[in-house]
Amino acid sequence: MSRFPLHLDLTGRRVLVVGGGAVAARRIGSLAGALVDVVAPEVVDGFPDVPLQRRAFRDSDVDGAWLVLACTGVVDDAVAAACEQRKVWCVRADDASLSPAWVPAVARVDDVVVSVTAGRDPRRAVGLRDALALALETGDLPLRRSRPGTGSVAVVGGGPGDPGLLTVRARRLLAGADVVVRDRLAPQVELPEGVEVVEVGKTPGGPSWDQRDIEALLVARAQDGKRVVRLKGGDVHVFARGIEEVAACADAGVAFEVVPGISSALAGPTLAGIPVTARGVTQTVSVVTAHLPPGDPGSTVDWDALARLGGTLVLLMAVGRLPAVCDALVAGGRDPSTPVAVVQDASLPTQRTIVTTLADAAADTADVRAPAVVVVGEVVAERHA
Ligand SMILES: C[S@@+](CC[C@H](N)C(=O)[O-])C[C@H]1O[C@@H](n2cnc3c(N)ncnc32)[C@H](O)[C@@H]1O
């Protein structure tokens, strides 16, 4: 027997369902868009709200239908015979081997439709369908288009660096990307051959891309019909310029989405075993950039106020400026014996943690290299191994 898989678009087409049981109800659920009529002497509780004729099947019911689903378990032979006579496709629920057409297990992920039939074993087909849908959703299958389509930009937070900390949504978008525009601190993920990768990360002391050029690149590639992933380190909006990239897309009329990522501000302490808001220790955590040191005319950080506030302080971009920050906090009234932890390369194989105090941090952390997250506060003493 030759079996030729074919997808029918039943939108606006008449589909007759014969039978009012659970199987009929389930199959009607997958007929969205079709004009469904049901013939059945009775229906089960909770049956879909579709036009229903409460009576026995008649051969003439088939007239005018594109497709008939025989789900009676009793008169399916008669339904199939009536269809055969009128050259109408009939799917039999009782025995797929007797059907000229059959219903696969179907999953839709974005614009991809997966249909599975498995040796006339519907449960096996459903199991495979679910596994394939999951693999598509998690970006484990090649989702990349081979034909041009509508361009878009996804501004994606990649987490602190370990590819295992990418979100499922991020993985799926990367699996379908034509272009990946990547920051230096974004995770180094394997990308399929043929994907254009543009490294725009700002290397300390090295060449760097101008932010406006990055935005122009995102927009230009999307306008060329490409699916662009802008892969950033941590979260897209935590001391990052995600909002400017989003605004550039919006201004240019380019479709975009924003995917949050795990920020190093929280992942760094957690990966080092530090609970930033340990119960009974503190009720506040402040995330602050030390990009500009205390006293810099451009800085808007009130270090005195932070010292008075107490609680947990998480500092990003503090490498090289930690001695000045510690001095400012002590000058503002914070106890010099307050514990400090510096977490370098959080989530990467090279991760290391140095535990010190405000008084000793300058001497103890002289060899720390970026990237590093600094945690100041009593919670550092709660650290687990
Ligand atoms: C420009 S900020 C970007 C922050 C990022 N958007 C986030 O949410 O993590 C860069 C700073 O993040 C911190 N950082 C990023 N990745 C890190 C990592 N793997 N380990 C420690 N700190 C990290 C460092 O303080 C670094 O200087």
Image (spheres, helix red, strand yellow):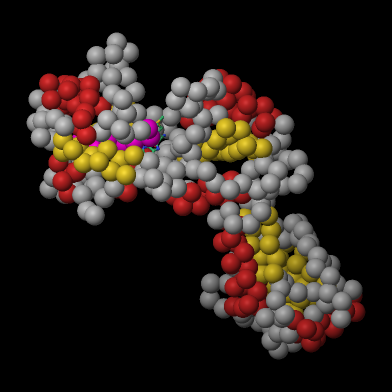
Coordinates of residue 278 in the picture (x, y in percent): 19, 48
Q: Which residue range is magenta in the image?
A: 370-376
Residue 57 visible within the image:
no
**Would you say residue 371 sits in the magenta stretch?**
yes
Q: Is residue 94 left or right of residue 4?
A: left
Total of numbered circles in the picture? Answer: 0
Front in this rendered view, residue 54 or 133: 133
Residue 96 pos. (x, y %): 75, 81
Asked if residue 284 lies in the magenta stretch, the reply is no
Q: Is residue 124 left or right of residue 286?
A: right
Q: Looking at the image, which residue is at 48% across and 27% down?
A: 203
Name the quarter showing ligand 1. Answer: top left
Q: Relative to residue 48, is residue 162 drawn left or right?
A: left
Q: Is residue 296 positioned above or below 242 on the image?
A: above
Dominant secondary structure of the magenta stretch?
strand
* Direction bottom: furthest residue: 74
Q: Is residue 64 left or right of residue 279?
A: right
Considering depth in this image, is 314 or 12 the residue closer to the camera? 314
Within the image, what quadrant is residue 336 found in?
top left
Give the position of the N terminus as an image quadrant: bottom right
Q: Residue at x 58, y 28 (%)?
A: 249
Identify which residue is drawn at 53% across, 38% down: 231
Depth check: 290 or 40 in front?
A: 290
Instruction: Pinpoint residue 39: horizontal percent, then vertical percent.
Output: 70, 76
- From the image, which quarter does the C terminus lie in? bottom left
Image quarter of residue 296: top left
Residue 355 appears in the figure: yes
